Image (cartoon, helix red, strand yellow):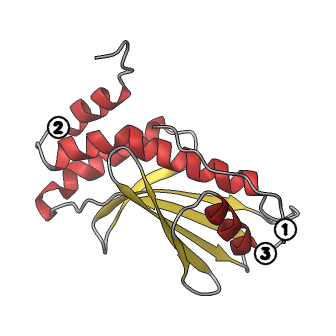
Amino acid sequence: MAVSLVEPERLSSDTLDAVERVMMASRLSFERMGEEDLTGSLTGSWCEYQLWFAYRADLDVLHFASGFDMGVPDERRPAVCALVNLINESLWVGHFDLWAEEGRPTWRHALLLRGTQGVEDSQIVEVVTVGVAECERFYPAFQQVIQAGLAPEEAFEAALMEPRGRA
């Protein structure tokens, strides 16, 4: 599934205002959680992805995370961590991790904004597009390791296969 976000005109320089603008223009549900973070959701092919943006003014960094709607049972955590390591070695942008508190696989990336004129709407669109695409790509691998007990190496290899033709 291709994520289709709308890139509206830039109206202000506030970082989370820009995120809100992109979310509204894309008709995505979201909620501002305070001065420094915003949550939302986006429906993908596999699940409803939870989106989270946080801004740290002291570092001038916008952090983005996209989480799956799946929990990892304690007995599958070592296998999921091994899968995360395999996946991360293949990524050029962002990384996956397993959030300890929630036990949920999550893709994360930070945009360093220091020395720039602020975040551009196109950057927000791109980070969400890339993050959700990576989540879509590897969701089946996480499911196979968690639910089917597949070895991390096998699930990773299956996720890298490019389908051809149509069924």
- Disc assigned to residue 14: 3
Which residue shows up at 81% across the image and 66% down it? 114
Residue 165 visible in the picture? yes
112 relative position to 129: left or right: right
Residue located beneath label 1 in the image: 11
Q: Quadrant of residue 100?
A: bottom left
Residue located beneath label 2 in the image: 151
Q: Position of residue 46 (x, y in %)?
A: 32, 46
Which residue type carries mark 3? Asp
Q: Position of residue 24 (x, y in %)?
A: 63, 65
Q: Mark 3 or mark 1, which is nearer to you?
A: 1
Label 2 crowd bin: few (<14), some (14–19), many (20+), radius 10 Å: some
Which quadrant: the C terminus?
Answer: top left
Which residue type carries mark 1? Leu
Q: Position of residue 154 (x, y in %)?
A: 22, 30
Which residue shows up at 17% across the image and 50% down it? 146
91 relative position to 7: left or right: left
Label 3 crowd bin: few (<14), some (14–19), many (20+), radius 10 Å: few
Residues under numbered marks 2 and 1 in contact, where contact means CB atoms less than 8 Å apart: no
What element does badge 2 sit on? loop
Residue situated furthest top in the rendering:
165
Which residue type carries mark 2? Ala
Q: CA distance from mark 3 to mark 2?
A: 45 Å
Tell me which numbered mark, 3 or 2, is placed earlier along the sequence: 3
Which residue shows up at 21% across the image and 54% down it? 78
What element does badge 3 sit on? loop
Label 1 crowd bin: few (<14), some (14–19), many (20+), radius 10 Å: few
